[in-house]
Image: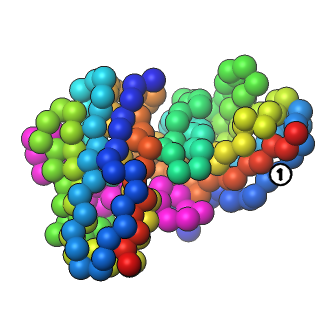
Amino acid sequence: GAVVSQHPSRVICKSGTSVKIECRSLDFQATTMFWYRQFPKQSLMLMATSNEGSKATYEQGVEKDKFLINHASLTLSTLTVTSAHPEDSSFYICSARGGEGIDEQFFGPGTRLTVL
Amino acid sequence: QKEVEQDPGPLSVPEGAIVSLNCTYSNSAFQYFMWYRQYSRKGPELLMYTYSSGNKEDGRFTAQVDKSSKYISLFIRDSQPSDSATYLCAMSRSTLGRLYFGRGTQLTVWP
């Protein structure tokens, strides 16, 4: 399958700081990228859907001013957690869609965010 | 009620056992049913997907969907220690629709 990378793989930051997570599709172009959050022993919860060149669509309950998403190119989307707090500590996973098939959505390896 | 329910386990079986993993759902509009495997601290990878009701087999893996009961299953035959992972079911209304995930079942296959 196609490869999606995320950077950094883990980050520890102090409360109140902002953290940027990058998601890249390495060998395909992705018009749509998704950002998920996964708490321990919980399911992946979709946070937002981003299409290249347009504003992200956020799921209900996700603060768009806190979780800034930029999808500036067909291979890169970024998630910025602004003014992070301990409750934002989680595993953040992106996925990228390379085509219209159900098997054409590929997941990144995730970023472990710990806010002290 | 959550859209997708999945028993988180953990499930521990000896090598060679047949493993049965299940999910139930409430939304009858779901048409695509997926099983993902997720190793610790990694992103999910797609194992199999099925459209509508029926069975699908791929090597040691068999996926079953019963839309009338809103129940899906994944069977793993001749399980191996390398199958140890968390298995997540996911569903979607269409190929381009958002995915709804279960909590995942943690499976350990011991030698």
At horizontal 62% and vertical 53% (from top left) the residue drawn is: B104
Q: Badge 1 is on which residue? A: B12
- The vertical placement of A54 against A59, above or below, is above
- Which span of residues is magenta-colored? A36-59
Question: Residue B7: where, in percent of width, then height?
Answer: 70, 59
At horizontal 28% and vertical 24% (from top left) the residue drawn is: A28
- The vertical placement of B48 against B23, above or below, is above
Question: Along the horizontal axis of the image, is A73 left or right of B84?
Answer: left
Question: Residue A92: where, in percent of width, then height?
Answer: 39, 56
Farthest residue toward the top?
B59
Give, as a three-letter code, the residue at label 1.
Answer: Ser
Q: Nearer the viewer, residue B61 or A39?
A: A39
- The vertical placement of B60 against B88, above or below, is above
Question: Residue B35: where, in percent of width, then height?
Answer: 59, 38
Inspect this view and state whether residue B97 appears: no
Magenta residue check for A63: no
At horizontal 48% and vertical 44% (from top left) the residue drawn is: B43
Inspect this view and state whether residue A25 appears: yes
- The vertical placement of B57 against B31, above or below, is above
